[in-house]
Amino acid sequence: MSPRHLRFLSPVIAVTAVAAVASAPSAVTALVPASAKAPAQAGAGAETVTSRTPCAKPTEQEPDSSQKHKLTSGELERGYVLRLPEGYDRRDDWPLIVAFHGRGSTGVEVEGYSELSELPAVVAYPDGAIGTGSGHRKAWQGAPYEAPGVDDVAFTADLLTAIEADHCIDATRVYATGKSNGGGLAALLACRMPGTFAAVAPVAPALYPGTRAGCTEASPTPILEIHGVADATIPYAGDADRDLPAIPEWVQGWADHNGCATSRTRTNRDVATTRWAGCDQGADVQHVAVHGGGHVWPGADTYSGGGHVTHTIESATVIWDFFSRHRLTSEG
């Protein structure tokens, strides 16, 4: 890759990430098997019925419910909400989505506006630690207001270990998403946890330099980015004073990094969707730009941030359609 292709990447390379890349499984495009039905709007992203082996891992949580849980990571007690889908007990290979909230928000709030809990998947909504700056607000690693000394990459690894130990999860279909500061963490995880996430989908991500650390040597990873062009909090055109990249350049950087060969843009009312194809290891890239859209979760029916909320698309539907086409494979 040329330096031009790496303009979105930090020169800081995480040693642990580099060491893991050589043996990490890669993400490829594939329709994933499942027995649960996706919401009607899921369209091409709906899963097909190929597995009906019952879940053999007992849990006190009932199917079709959300429950708060705790775990200890880095000597800190951390919390998360876990959603088990309807019919959870009837399958042993559920996809897992981890959704990270924005600064000052909570996992409960993300579940409330994202509609991710309507998908045929187990969904985890973790809470960040109290960060720095004004207010007593939860935040994630990678931003200037992150909690000092808190390793959210390690916390994510501990979270996945805890969930997979006690629940029927298909380890080849684990995905990450998040909004704003949480979207920045999701982007960081694509770089720092190779071979863990089959695809990553940040929404209006706060892409501070700390979220780009360790990306240069990262494995090709399927990336979907959704952003409002009129976002006043994390500007679509970037913010030099905060060292935030222009979103189109950041996405193009991932397309270059993944070795994508072609791109095509289609517009539906106020939404322009660009898809890159012919990417290495099937790690395709997709960008959804909402013209006039604010710092929000597109399609949300309740408050998710400031600015205009489009209903031309539903973010959960777009994300699920992208996720359900990718899984990890040991073939590079």
Image: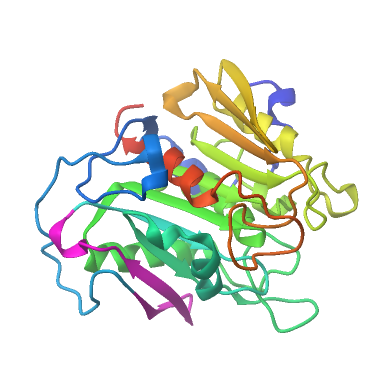
> Is 80 situated left or right of 56 in this image?
right
Q: Please say whether residue 198 is visible from this viewpoint.
A: no
Which of the pair 101/14 is nearer the observer?
Answer: 101
Q: Residue at x 35, y 68 (%)?
A: 83
Which of the pair 255/49 is nearer the observer?
Answer: 49
**Snapshot colouring:** rainbow
> Is 281 situated left or right of 217 in this image?
left
Which of the pair 183/19 is nearer the observer?
Answer: 183
Q: Please say whether residue 55 is visible from this viewpoint.
A: yes
Q: Residue at x 71, y 55 (%)?
A: 206
Q: Which residue extends farthest right?
A: 241
Q: Position of residue 92 (x, y in %)?
A: 16, 55
| Predominant SS of the magenta segment | strand
Which of the pair 272/17 is nearer the observer?
Answer: 272
Q: Magenta segment: does it hold 129?
A: no
Which region shows up in magenta?
Answer: 66-92
Total marks shown come to 0
Q: Quadrant of the C terminus?
A: top left
Q: Position of residue 99 (x, y in %)?
A: 49, 60
Q: Residue at x 41, y 56 (%)?
A: 97
Q: Position of residue 242 (x, y in %)?
A: 85, 54
Q: Quadrant of residue 263?
A: top right
> Is 231 situated left or right of 328 in this image?
right
Q: Magenta segment: does it hold 78?
A: yes
Q: Position of residue 233 (x, y in %)?
A: 80, 58
Q: Quadrant of the N terminus?
A: top right
